[in-house]
Image: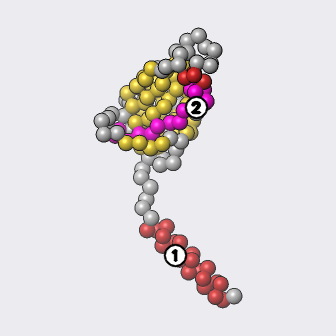
Amino acid sequence: MRTQILKGAGLAVLLGMATLSAPAPVAAADIRANVPFTFTVKGKVLPAGTYNVSNNNTALVIRGNSSGVVTLGQHTESSTSSSPKLVFHRYGDEYILREVWMGASGYSLPQTSRERELASGRSGAATASASFDRVEVAIQ
């Protein structure tokens, strides 16, 4: 019994030391953008307005005055672009957020079922087409 207690205490000490020596998480990056149109993120429709986008190394948090959404994205780097921006795919009058750039690093958001529907032309909307326009919104 005493051996099990000592092993447990030793394990607790090792875990504590590992936690103390682990690097601190990188501070969250915040950007602010004025989006002049209604857009969709992760299936949620957000109204036009000013949005703060935060990256906490786990998820992107997109917050407006009256609404917001939390989403995951795949981290990516760019050697050609260093300007912060939001990148949307526009199908007719529907805008879908697909990229968030905080400088030379950014996040690519996954394609939603709605965008797959719009891209295939199955939406039934007269303004949708199988191709999209890339729309960039610069950060304030």
Magenta part of the protein: which range? Answer: 103-116
Q: Is residue 47 visible?
A: no
Q: Is residue 115 above or below residue 21?
A: above
Mark 2: secondary structure: loop
Res 112 label: 2
Provide residue 36's location: percent of width, then percent of height.
46, 20
Q: Residue at x 50, y 29 (%)?
A: 97
**10 Å neighbourhood of mark 2: few (<14), some, or many (≥20)?**
some
Examine the image and state in which quarter residue 3 appears. bottom right
The one nearer the camera, 131 or 7, is: 131
* Type of the residue with mark 2: Thr
Provide residue 39's location: percent of width, then percent of height.
53, 24
* Relative horizontal placement of residue 140, taking residue 90 as reference (left or right): left
Q: Residue at x 42, y 61 (%)?
A: 23
Provide residue 56's location: percent of width, then percent of height.
48, 47
**10 Å neighbourhood of mark 1: few (<14), some, or many (≥20)?**
few
Query: Which label's residue is closer to the chain start, 1 or 2?
Result: 1
Q: Is residue 72 above or below residue 32?
A: below
Provide residue 75's location: percent of width, then percent of height.
44, 44
Q: Residue at x 53, y 16 (%)?
A: 129
Is-magenta flag for residue 110?
yes
Query: Where is mark 1, residue-wise?
Result: 14
The one nearer the camera, 126 or 2, is: 126
Is-magenta flag for residue 130?
no
* Type of the residue with mark 1: Leu
* Nearest-to-viewer mark from 1 and 2: 2
Quarter containing the C terminus: top left
Examine the image and state in which quarter residue 128 appears. top right
* Relative horizontal placement of residue 85, taking residue 123 as reference (left or right): left
The one nearer the camera, 99 or 25, is: 99
* Relative horizontal placement of residue 21, taking residue 111 as reference (left or right): left
Mark 1: secondary structure: helix
